[in-house]
Structure formats: C-alpha cells, structure tokens
Amino acid sequence: MCSSDLVFNKYDLLRRIISENTEVKDEEIVQTKGNRKIISEVDEDARSGQKSKDKKFTGYKVATLRSISGYTLDVQTIPGNVPDMKLAPELLKNVVEDYNEIPVQAAFDKGFDSIENRLEIHSLGVQPGIEFRQMGNSRNANFFPNTEFTLDLEVLQVICPAGNVTTKYTTLHDPERYLFKFSKAQCLNCSLFNQCTTNKTGRSFQFSFYTELIESDKKYLESDQYEIVRKARWGQEADYGIGKRAHCLTKTRYHGIKKISFFNRMIFLVMNVKRYIKQNSIAKRTGGTRGHSVF
C-alpha cells in the first residue's frame, strides 16, 4: 500500500467517525447520543460506555458465567455501548453445549432482569435467580400498591382492597401486559378512594402476561437454594477484581474485538488453572477430596 492510499484510508475512517458521532442541529455541530459508532481510528470495534452517571469508559464489556465451585465456564466480550442484558441466556446456552450438562439454577445480576431473559432461561430447563428491580411511583408511595389487588387469571378480573371488581382491560406490548381500569363510579363512591388514587376517572394499573411465572420466581428468591447461589456470586465480583489487578483485564495491548475476546478468555483460563492448583494443594494437605462437578 502506497502512502497516498494510507492517507485516503485514514481520511475515510476519520470522516466515518465524524459522521456517525455528530450531527448538525440548529446550524451547530453537536454530538449524537445513543448508540455511537466508530470512535477510534486505532480500534474500529471499540465503543464508549457508561457504568453510571460519573463512570464512563472506552472499550469493551466482559460478561462471565461462574460455577458454584469457583470456575469460570464462559466469557463473552462485547463493545462498550452494547447492552449486556441479553447475554444471560447466551452464556447458559454455551455452557450447556460445551459441558453437555444443564444447571438446575443460575443467578444473575439485577441488570439481567427482563421477562425475555426469564422466559428463555426457563425454556432451557434452568431456574433463573434474578432479583427484581424495584419499580414504583414515589409521588404515590402512600397509595395501595398493586400487591393489594387480587388478580384472577382464569377469568381475567381484578378485585381492589375495597372489594370492587373490574373485568375491563386492554392489552399492551413491549413488554406484554394487561392494563386494568376501574370505572369512575366505582372509585368516586369508594370509601378508600383517598388511599388509592387521585385520578378522578378511576384507578388503573398493569399486570404482566406472565404474572404466574414472575410470582414463581419471586418465591424461589426466598428459598435456601437461591441463598447458596447468591452468595456464590460474590466470588465472581472478586474474580473481576483479581483480573483487573493482576491480569490486565482493565487494559489490553490488543485491538479489535476478536483479539480482545481471546485475550479475556485466556485471563479467566489462567485464573481457573490457578484455582485448580490451589484447591488440589489444599485437598492434599487436609486429606480431603476435590469436587469435580461443573455446576
């Protein structure tokens, strides 16, 4: 490649970076928000991400699946601006294919809480241990919550705390849910109106199409089995700390998602080998045996 070709290639790349990350608005050039594209001429796969309001980064995200015995079973690397919410089923599918064994249960961070994830994990024959993110309206914190209303899925009716019944509903999507509505007459003539709503047209609220599955998952979160898996996740956070501190997980000399994906897998492979050696060394000293179950 001659020098002129190199210059033109760099020029085209720079033009793509500018066009994908900026736009003209009110005769001014402003940065586009949302899923920004190429941001670096050194690494075309890198993206900018944000863990919180004050924590921003450029590069990639790493998601892992870890067994209760402490071994990392799968590692996925994605660009920094790609949501990792949908990675939970993919991680499980890879483990099932690689080890030909289906785990009974699997715990994930709250960030993986979506009905799509729950349905797909259940379809694999695995009980998801994903805590529910708190949803609510702080302005109406003193009103009756949805848990005070009784939903009958067989006849699709709802009974309020005062005993009023409604069968009026519409279906909504993304996510799929029912929107139930009590009439104006029911609510305005109710003795508990001031404890329920300020809406003069009547109380309305939503229930998911998958309420039974959600209630089943909530019961599992209260079980002793989930408590064991939940505590095992603490070790996963420690693994990330060790990887960053001792194995260059924070920064890499490589560019491109393929090379960095391989690099990250090697990091957790080395940590698996170190854990294996340590566990066997302890077993020899204590005369115990090391468990060989994957999950």
Image (spheres, grey):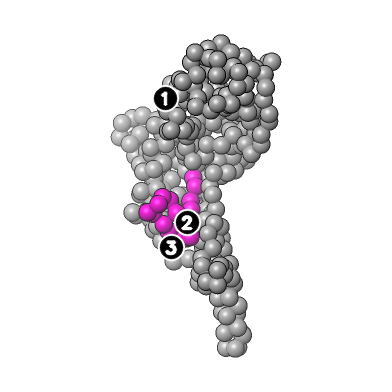
Q: Main secondary structure of the magenta part?
A: strand
The answer to which image quadrant residue 171 occupies is top right
Visible in this render: residue 270?
no
Any magenta on residue 197? Answer: no
Q: Nearer the viewer, residue 118 or 187?
A: 187
Task: Determine which residue is flagged by label 3.
Answer: 252
Mark 2 element type:
strand
- Residue at the location (45% across, 20% down)? 195
Above or below, comparing residue 97 to residue 128 in the picture: below
Residue 156 at x, y percent in the picture = 67, 19
Residue 267 at x, y percent in the picture = 44, 53
Q: Which residues are magenta?
A: 48-64
Above or below, comparing residue 121 to residue 81 in the picture: above
The three-letter amino acid code for the residue at tag 3 is: Thr
Residue 293 at x, y percent in the picture = 50, 32
Above or below, comparing residue 295 to residue 90 in the picture: above
Task: Determine which residue is flagged by label 2.
Answer: 49
Q: Is residue 77 left or right of residue 153?
A: left
Q: Nearer the viewer, residue 124 or 201?
A: 201
Mark 3 element type:
loop
Residue 28 at x, y percent in the picture = 52, 71
Cα–Cα gap, marks 3 and 1: 51 Å
The three-letter amino acid code for the residue at tag 2 is: Gly
Task: Give the mark, 2 or 1, whose residue is nearer the N terminus.
Answer: 2
The three-letter amino acid code for the residue at tag 1 is: Asn
Q: Nearer the viewer, residue 107 or 207?
A: 207
Cα–Cα gap, marks 2 and 3: 17 Å
- Residue at the location (39% across, 43% down)? 237
Q: Which mark is residue 142?
A: 1
CB contact under 8 Å: marks 2 and 1: no
Any magenta on residue 63? Answer: yes
Visible in this render: residue 55?
yes
